């Protein structure tokens, strides 16, 4: 393991993790904006957004309200699709895993990096010490139940969501 490989691996992990966390945040923010537009009048929008959307409700709560309004056809989205909430769940899950994981650096992970795979170690109670693998190549398949994800699939899914939520 040389310093150049180690630095490139570490930087790539930071970039990918940052992209995943930022994307999850942007989707949550777009949901918050949609809910604010639905519930608040023009004069109270900023207060509603500040006190309810950012300080009170969790992403899970917002997603539930958003999903319920969609289901009851009270919130109409221009490019809506059936699996939207399922796709949001997926992005939220990967985002949460990345937010609570650390980069694994050893000879094995550097070898996997040569095969376009990044390795993180989850630090939460639920998945403590379990590896999360992020494939950064073009044609990788995901095994979500084993915590193996693809940047390519994550990006495609996020793009579909973004088209609906106008991110």
Image (cartoon, grey):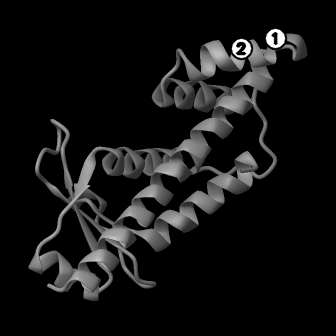
Compared to 101, does 124 lie above or below? above
Q: Residues within 10 Å of mark 2 (few under 14, many from 20)?
A: some
Q: Residue at x 67, y 26 (%)?
A: 69
- Element under label 2? helix
Q: Residue at the far right: name it.
A: 42
Q: Please tell me which residue lies in front, 163 or 2.
A: 2
Compared to 51, does 88 lie above or below? below
- In the rendered image, residue 26, in percent from the top left (x then y), is placed at 61, 45
The quarter of the rendered structure image containing the N terminus is bottom left
- Element under label 1? helix
Q: Residue at the far front: name it.
A: 3
Corner quadrant of residue 53: top right
Compared to 120, does 97 lie above or below? above
Q: Do the residues labelled 2 and 1 touch (CB within 8 Å)?
A: yes
Left/right of residue 155 with respect to residue 162 in the rendered view? left
Residue wearing tag 2: 48
Q: Could you say which disc has been placed on residue 6 in the image?
A: none
Q: Which residue is drawn at 40% across and 58% down?
A: 17
Q: Residue at x 49, y 47 (%)?
A: 86
Q: Which residue is drawn at 37% across and 70% down?
A: 11
Q: Please tell me which residue lies in front, 83 or 152.
A: 152
Q: Please tell me which residue lies in front, 84 or 139.
A: 139
CA gap, disc 2 to disc 1?
6 Å
Corner quadrant of residue 130: bottom left
- In the rendered image, residue 84, in percent from the top left (x then y), is placed at 59, 48
Compared to 8, does 120 lie above or below? above
Residue wearing tag 1: 44
């Amino acid at each position: 393991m040389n310093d150049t490989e180690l630095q490139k691996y570490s930087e790539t992990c930071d970039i990918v993790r940052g992209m995943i966390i930022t994307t999850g945040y942007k989707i949550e923010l777009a949901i918050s904006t949609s809910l604010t537009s639905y519930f608040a009048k023009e004069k109270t929008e900023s207060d509603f957004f500040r006190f309810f959307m950012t300080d009170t409700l969790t992403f899970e709560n917002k997603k539930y309200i958003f999903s319920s309004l969609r289901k009851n056809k009270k919130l109409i989205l221009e490019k809506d699709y059936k699996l939207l909430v399922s796709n949001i769940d997926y992005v939220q899950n990967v985002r949460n895993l990345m937010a609570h994981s650390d980069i694994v650096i050893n000879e094995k992970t550097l070898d996997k990096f040569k095969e376009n795979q990044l390795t993180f170690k989850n630090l939460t109670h639920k998945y403590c010490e379990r590896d999360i693998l992020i494939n950064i190549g073009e044609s990788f398949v995901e095994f979500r139940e084993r915590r193996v994800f693809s940047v390519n699939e994550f990006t495609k899914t996020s793009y579909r969501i973004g088209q609906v939520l106008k991110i």
